[in-house]
Amino acid sequence: MHLSVGENAVAKRITFVGADQQSLTLLDKALGLIPTNLPAARRTALHELGIDIEELNVRLQRHLSEYLSGERTRSSVEWWMKREIRYFYRHAYLEGLRSAGNYKPLDEWGDKTLVRLRRQEYRYLRQFLNDVDARAGVMDYRRRMRMYADALSGVYWLAFVRANRSSRRRIRWVRTPAESCPTCLKLDGRKWTPQDFLRWYKRTGILPGKGTQCLSNCKCLLEDYYV
């Protein structure tokens, strides 16, 4: 039976042995529902990411305000902040996978990655709260809190790269017209295979919105294409 995978896809003929006609018909229908307009899906995912960043910021700022005013204990505030980060990190990671066409459930590798990213962020969060307790630090606390929300973009882009590691796929750094730091200017237009990008990220810790000199002000994007 010939199974279609979308009007823009390349048709392939697959032979199933022992399958009944009804099962094949249902499979053909399911494959036809797979989105083929990934650029549009990616725009939607980026829109959702922006909403999530704002929502995470609102929640973190509320917890911080309640702590600064003495309404909540540190243990309570820290627990809730970690909970917010855990929820939104998972959602951003899944959105990153889907924006690159990977609609599979989160695998063990993804779970371990999220645990590592969260633990790293929790260490920064504890230090931040230590500074609040000591009334230390040079940056405004609310502005510093905002950076924890903006870091969500890095989680999204890491998943975006990991979604598909085909040797024909290429990842390209794209700088937006907005003001850019020296890191972003240097990276603009650079290309990698997914494997090379992940090795480079492991060495540098750089993603759009993470590890650049402009920090959470980064507005760069990653694009992919096939060769």
Image (spheres, rainbow, N blue to C red):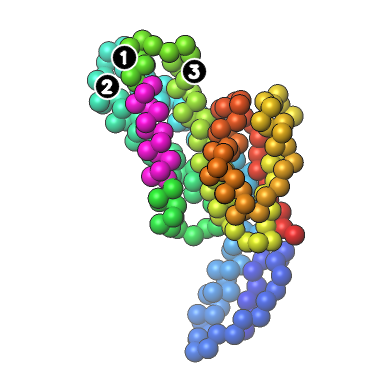
Looking at the rendered structure, the kind of residue marked 1 is Asp
User: Which of disc 2 and disc 1 is earlier in sequence?
Assistant: 2
Looking at the picture, how far across and down is residue 86, in whole percent? 38, 39
- Residue 18 shown in magenta: no
> Measured along the vertical axis of the image, is residue 179 above or below residue 203?
above
Looking at the image, which is closer to me, 128 or 12?
128
Is residue 68 left or right of 102 when viewed as pictured? left
Q: Which residue is mark 2?
A: 74
Residue beneath disc 1: 133
State the residue in front, 37 or 202: 202
Q: Residue lying farthest front?
A: 203
Q: Which residue is mark 3?
A: 143
Can residue 121 be found in the magenta stretch?
yes
Query: The residue under label 3 is which amino acid type?
Result: Arg
Q: Earlier in the sequence, mark 3 or mark 1?
A: 1
What residue is drawn where x is 70% and y is 74%?
A: 11
Q: Quadrant of residue 178?
A: top right
Determine crowd level at label 2: few under 14, some 14-19, many 20+ residues with C-alpha closer than 10 A.
some
Residue 133, relative to residue 103: is it above or below?
A: above
Q: Nearer the viewer, residue 150 or 198?
A: 198
The answer to whether the residues at label 1 and label 2 have Cβ atoms under 8 Å apart is: yes
Instruction: Report the span colored magenta.
Output: 114-128
Marks 3, 1: nearer the viewer: 1
**Local SS, label 1:** helix
Mark 2: amino acid? Arg
* Residue 22, x across and y down, in percent: 51, 82
Q: Is residue 72 above or below residue 165?
A: above
